[in-house]
Amino acid sequence: MVKRQNHKQIETVNVTAKTTNATCTKAGQTVYTSAAFKNTAFKVQTKTVAIKATGHKFSAWKTTSFNVDKKTATQTRKCTRGDKTETQTVNNAVVRFAGSNRAETGTLISAGMYKTANTVIIATGFDFHDALAAVPLASAYNAPLLLADRDNLSAKTLAEIKRLKAKNVIVVATTNAKDLNGNDAAIKSNVYNQLKELKVKVTKLDGKTYYETAKKVADALGKKKAAPTSVFITTDKNYADALSASPVAAILGAPILYVDPKASLNATTKNYLASIKKSVKNVYIVGGVNAVSASVEKAILNTLGKKSATRFAGDNRYDTCVLINKSFAKNLTGKSVCIAKGYNFPDALAGGVLAAKNKAPLFLADAIGGKAQLSKTQSSYLNSKNPSKLYIFGGETAVPTALVKTVAKASV
Ligand SMILES: [Zn+2]
């Protein structure tokens, strides 16, 4: 028997490749084809390698319209190849917190933020100083800011403290607090009796002056968080400019302090500033020279050993609001915008804590003379922000639906 011999012949030829690219939805392929072989025993060879469909590559969802009445938002996203656009409807895109009074609105905002909270902050709802200073402290404690009535805590506020299962209550209360009409707005002993019944631990941050209380709040904030690297200074005469600074101050863990526009820098604020000289890098002054005078600014900088401050002073409260929110855009990275009345403070301050939690700007707007209009500055800010959610602090009289619709329209 003759053994069959193993015979191998190898011939190398060039191969050409032809690729059909995959698209988002269709597979592609590469077909490799050999050139003809010299050895006629070899046939031309081909090999097909499949390329998977890439799938769509979508950009982020963009809100294209709000339906304020239905509380929804419509969003779209496009494939970067331009072959597909998707649309979705988002529910609860417009959320309004509206109680029958300021204290109740505060409890609704609290309920919208927390299932439980160890700590609750309380300040009077009838004067802005203590509540404004308290916003960063509330944020530091993950606590809501609840507002006291003139003589007591309302039944709804007490119920909210219980619902939260709070163990600690910090009462921020200047002893001679007055409302803007000069009427007594101090927290009454009755409030402390009510808290005693709730069996919570009560801490009082009280001063004889707004300066003292703000200093005590600032000290408590520094203890809870860290020595502040930023500080906000505003007038003790008006809340207009400072409202929109409250969420930003809260996010930065920065205290809010008061000065008298017509006097020299008060000793309490000065002493506090001296105590944070080492940690502070940024000094923010809220309001024009009628709010914080040039000489007070100089005294502040001297005390802190700083060369300059950043001053936020627009033509009006709405301009100042936009200025502040634009300046801190890198801190306000949330997808929502919080809307509050610019001509009152309680809703904006209770809401400031929610804004800070959502890293959202507090946007002040009013329907002046019944007209739900926005300035160009306001509209263009909203447009650039393009929020996917709107929070509204206060009821129909505070922020009318027509105004919310104007804001919603400007936001897309
Ligand atoms: Zn695509």
Image (spheres, rainbow, N blue to C red):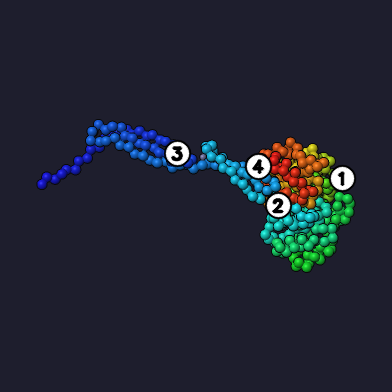
In the image shown, does 296 or 341 lie closer to the viewer?
Answer: 341
Q: Which residue is mark 3?
A: 22
Residue mark closest to the camera, 2 vs 1: 2
Q: Residue at x 56, y 40 (%)?
A: 85
CB atoms of marks 3 and 1 within 8 Å: no
The disc, 1 or 4, on the residue closer to the chain's N-terminal end is 4
What is the distance, in whole Å, between disc 2 and disc 1 at their CAs? 34 Å
From this viewpoint, which residue is outermost toward the left?
Answer: 1
Q: Which residue is mark 2?
A: 354
The label shown at residue 90 is none
What is the distance, in whole Å, between disc 2 and disc 4 at their CAs? 24 Å
List x then y, in percent, for residue 17: 37, 34
The disc, 2 or 1, on the residue closer to the chain's N-terminal end is 1
Element on which disc 3 rests: loop
Q: Residue at x 45, y 40 (%)?
A: 26
Query: Looking at the picture, which amino acid does disc 3 mark?
Result: Ala
The disc, 3 or 4, on the residue closer to the chain's N-terminal end is 3
CB atoms of marks 3 and 2 within 8 Å: no
Q: Which residue is mark 1?
A: 263
**Going by the image, does 294 lie left or right of 116?**
right
